[in-house]
Amino acid sequence: MKNKNQKRKARKEGKTFSINQDSFFTDYKKRRKSDYDDDDDIDSGDSEEEMEVPGGSYAGIEEDNEGIEETADERRKRIAAQYLEKIREIAKREREEEEEHEDERESEKEGERDTLVAKILQQEQLEESGRVRRVIASRVKRPEPSDEFRVLVKHRQSVTAVALSEDDLKGFSASKDGTILHWDVESGKSEKYQWPSEEVLRTQGVKDPQGRATKHSKQVLALAVSSDGRYLATGGLDRHVHLWDTRTRDHLQAFPGHRGPVSCLTFRLGSTELFSGSFDRTVKIWNVEDRAYINTLYGHQSEVLTIDCLRKERVLTVGRDRTMQLFKVPEESRLVFRAPASSLECCCFINNDEFLSGSDDGSVELWTILKKKPLHIIKNAHALLPALKKVQDRDDEIIPEGNIGKLKDEG
């Protein structure tokens, strides 16, 4: 009120009023001057924005930081730090469970915990890159004279697919007669999966036959088991992907979408992501945990015959179009490999960068993502020779090579 009265009085008398006469600004200047009397580094020509505020921070900097966006490098660093802290907590809990009553110095505990963290990270990296090596030779038993192969006749028609769980304890087989069997590897005992009724199948996702099909066929062509051994996926002439629970052998879900028979299936290691290949030339991606369709991959010009996948989202497929294709799912790209002189029939990963293929002429090829041609070919690996015929002269022996004709075996 006092300042306002001074201004009015000055206007009546015809005088100008300066802010230098205002007691508020006078006191503010005195306060600012007293605050910086002890600071010898501040230049009198510096602006207020450049002047350092006592306490070591700019006024209002917290509000400014909230609006600053995080860069990609900073985000990666923050996520890596959070992940490392999470792994350390896991290692700490494991260490505490193992040695509850042991008293050690904190530095020693921290060092051992970091060693365990390094081992966990290294194992995850090896699994991710497909270079995990497991020492199993010491556990392999030598065959005894009484050991022999056993032929278990359980299917009434031709067996079309077999699968083995990751722990090698459970086996699965399917046949053209529509039966699916669950085997115990040690004892050889089997249990049969029962198909639910047509009404139940419809409630679980089965659609009516489309195209040339007039009725549903339970003929199974492909099998796949999840890494944890919980889910079994089957596919066949009914153009559906069926999901089963291996613990109860109950039918869980049917995934429609393919316009041709489902010819091959594979789970991505360490996940519930399922890939299915079909005679409709496509590869579809499903999430069995969420019972959901994810995406469709295109590229083959004919039926898809074989499919394989490791931990990375990379899918290797072989089709009747004489090509092998590597789909990089996150990058939405693919690499095409063509057989030199024959049709490819099957494929499998060695690691994320190397893989094998088999041809209809009996040869096996080794490939790498760095070359469009095979690194090495073993011709006649599955020889088309008469039974009990002995090859004496490897250099001069003429061996049939399927579509290629008669070529000399190159060993």
Image: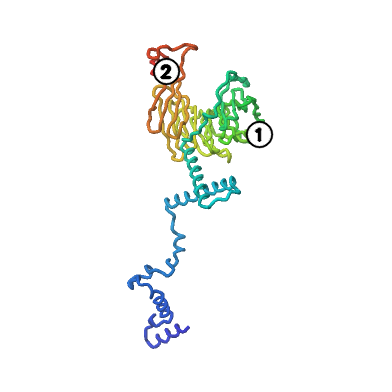
Position of 276 with respect to 391 (left or right) is: right
Answer yes or no: is residue 142 visible: yes
Query: Which amino acid, mark 2?
Result: Asn
Q: Residue at x 42, y 18 (%)?
A: 403
Helix, strand or loop at mark 1: loop
Residue in front for this viewpoint, 277 or 226: 226
Q: Say which label, 1 or 2, has the lower sequence index.
A: 1
Query: Which amino acid, mark 1?
Result: Thr
Give the color scheme: rainbow, by chain, secondary structure or one colour. rainbow
Q: Residues within 10 Å of mark 2 (few under 14, many from 20)?
A: few
Helix, strand or loop at mark 2: helix
Q: Which mark is residue 212?
A: none
407 lies above or below 54? above
Number of marks in picture: 2
Residue in front for this viewpoint, 274 or 58: 58
Relative image position of residue 170 (x, y in whole percent): 60, 29
Quadrant including the C terminus = top left
Marks 1 and 2 close (CB-CB < 8 Å): no
Farthest residue in the bottom direction? Answer: 13
Relative image position of residue 227 (x, y in whole percent): 56, 35
**Closer mark to the observer between disc 1 and disc 2:** 1
Position of 122 with respect to 169 (left or right) is: left
Residue in front for this viewpoint, 132 or 162: 132
Q: Residues within 10 Å of mark 1 (few under 14, many from 20)?
A: few
Q: According to the image, label 2 marks what residue? A: 403
Could you tell me how far apart the alpha carbons at marks 1 and 2 are, in whole angstroms?
Answer: 47 Å
**Residue 351 found in image quarter:** top left
Q: According to the image, label 1 marks what residue? A: 248
Relative image position of residue 23 (x, y in whole percent): 43, 82
Relative image position of residue 229 (x, y in whole percent): 59, 34
Answer yes or no: is residue 180 visible: no
